[in-house]
Image: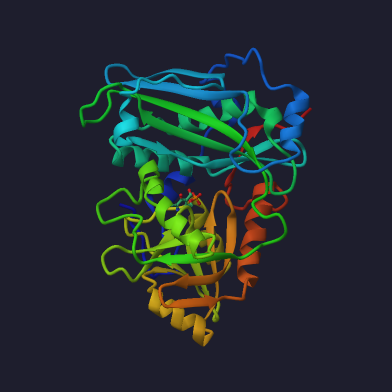
């Protein structure tokens, strides 16, 4: 379980944040661990140009995928970057029955000089391994996780878009691929990384989103898998997400499952509250919340700029009272996909309130996206170069 110093303003280091600080060797030094078997029929250049000119999220995939296989007897092997294509699985494949799987989400950004970078890959590598541990899956050597991103992005570099807010979304995942119906950890596991060019989350500026606060459903429980990035957490959020849409809201926010009164997170983003006195608060990591890389980076940036950031319990009742009294001035969500999004409306059983402010949210959004796009200095060494500038 992640440990944090809940209320101090010192940088509350967690094991993931500490892991992310360990330098990864330069991409050239680890490239080639996943040797390329080139796709004999890649998407034609003009077709790719049409895709890149009209980007959404998760609709199109590049010409290749990284792959490795683990067996109980041999460990990890079969590293490669291979042509993207369908998988052939036995109907008895364990993941289809018991959901033993994990995944990650990380982006590759093209900078103005043509180079391609990613953000804190070692954080995702460490979280992948933390998720693997919880789901009784084998972890990967962190450098190999990063090497799989390097080799895939180098193979498909033509797919990395260059428009503002655009990126190549990378989706590493691993699943129980043994064909058997017993309930036990799989003795065969497959790891893949697929890549999808994605557009800016916002079509015009920082659009606030509306939130349905679910009191009927919870995303995670104590001792469960909430802190792991595993498919079941997302499957269980789909019904409450549908409820959110029916309530006219964009996303669902979950409360804790014990007292059913404290904020946890959205289905795919962490949540932060900005008080009128400038303090930023976020739910502390209890083991039921996914420890976001974006959350961790924002806490670090804000504390270093002298702002008080508190990781603590935030009750819904206290939040609603704060919005009404004016003590709470902004609420925002954060995660890799959208980076930072203001929450403009909170709705739930018996309340429907608006939040107008977004000044601090906008500042954080601009600072983080400028670092990611290579337009601002990166004082933390968060950016990792996958592909060097075009010569
Ligand atoms: C449930 C959940 N919470 C939070 C996050 C934000 O994490 P990150 O900032 O690492 O993308 C994500 C996205 O990965 C998520 O799925």
187 lies above or below 367: above
Where does residue 311 sit, x and y in percent of width and height? 41, 67
Question: Which residue does the image show at 62% across and 75% down from the upper left?
Answer: 357
The residue most toward the bottom is 325
Residue 170 placement: quadrant: top right
Q: Nearer the viewer, residue 189 or 371?
A: 189
Q: How is the image coloured?
A: rainbow
**For this rendering, which residue is in front, 50 or 268?**
50
Question: Which is more toward the observer, 74 or 382?
Answer: 74
Q: How many numbered discs sit on the rendered protein? A: 0
**Measuring 44% from the left and 50% from the top, which residue is drawn there?**
17
Can the viewer see residue 116?
yes
Query: Looking at the rendering, which quadrant does residue 342 occupy?
Result: bottom right
Whether 18 is drawn above or below 329: the answer is above
- Can residue 138 be seen here? The reply is no
Residue 187 position, x and y percent, is: 27, 23
Point 40% across, 79% down: residue: 318
> Quarter of the image holding residue 174?
top left
Please give left or right for residue 49 compared with residue 175 in the image: right
335 sits left or right of 365 in the view: left
Find residue 374 and report its horizontal and vertical position in percent.
70, 47
Give the side of residue 53 with respect to residue 109, left or right: right
Closer to the camera, 362 or 44? 44
Q: Position of residue 218 (x, y in %)?
A: 34, 59
Q: Please state, as top left, top right, bottom left or bottom right, where the C terminus lies in the image.
A: top right
Q: In this image, 246 relative to 379: left or right?
A: left
């Amino acid at each position: 379980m992640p440990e944090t110093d809940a209320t101090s303003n010192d940088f509350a280091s967690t094991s993931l944040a500490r892991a992310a600080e360990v330098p990864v060797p330069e991409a050239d030094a680890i490239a080639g661990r996943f040797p390329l078997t080139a796709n004999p029929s890649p998407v034609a250049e003009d077709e790719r140009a049409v895709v890149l000119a009209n980007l959404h999220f998760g609709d199109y995939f590049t010409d290749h995928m990284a792959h490795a296989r683990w067996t109980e007897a041999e460990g990890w092997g079969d590293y490669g970057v291979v042509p993207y294509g369908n998988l052939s699985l036995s109907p008895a494949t364990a993941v289809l029955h018991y959901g033993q799987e994990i995944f990650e989400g990380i982006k590759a950004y093209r900078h103005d000089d043509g180079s391609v970078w990613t953000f804190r890959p070692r954080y995702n590598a460490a979280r992948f391994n933390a998720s693997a541990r919880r789901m009784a899956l084998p972890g990967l050597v962190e450098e190999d996780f990063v090497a799989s991103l390097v080799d895939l992005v180098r193979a498909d570099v033509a797919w990395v878009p260059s428009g503002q807010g655009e990126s190549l979304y990378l989706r590493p995942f691993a699943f129980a691929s043994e064909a058997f119906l017993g309930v036990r950890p799989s003795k065969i596991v497959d790891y893949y990384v697929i890549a999808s060019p994605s557009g800016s989350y916002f079509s015009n500026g920082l659009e606030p989103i509306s939130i349905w606060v679910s009191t009927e459903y919870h995303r995670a429980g104590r001792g469960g898998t909430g802190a792991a990035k595993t498919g079941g957490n997302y499957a269980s959020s789909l019904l409450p997400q549908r409820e959110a849409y029916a309530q006219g809201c964009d996303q669902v926010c979950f409360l804790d499952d014990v007292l059913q009164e404290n904020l946890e997170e959205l289905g795919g983003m962490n949540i932060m509250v900005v008080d009128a006195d400038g303090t930023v608060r976020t739910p502390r990591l209890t083991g039921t919340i996914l420890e976001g890389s974006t959350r961790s980076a924002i806490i670090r940036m804000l504390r270093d700029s002298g702002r008080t950031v508190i990781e603590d319990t935030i009750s819904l009742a206290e939040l609603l009272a704060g919005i009404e009294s004016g003590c709470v001035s902004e609420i925002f969500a954060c995660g890799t996909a959208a980076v930072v999004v203001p929450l403009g409306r909170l709705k739930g059983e018996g309340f429907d309130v608006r939040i107008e402010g977004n000044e601090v949210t906008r500042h954080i959004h601009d600072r983080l996206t400028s670092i990611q796009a290579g337009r601002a200095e990166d004082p933390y060494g968060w950016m990792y170069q996958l592909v060097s500038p075009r010569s």
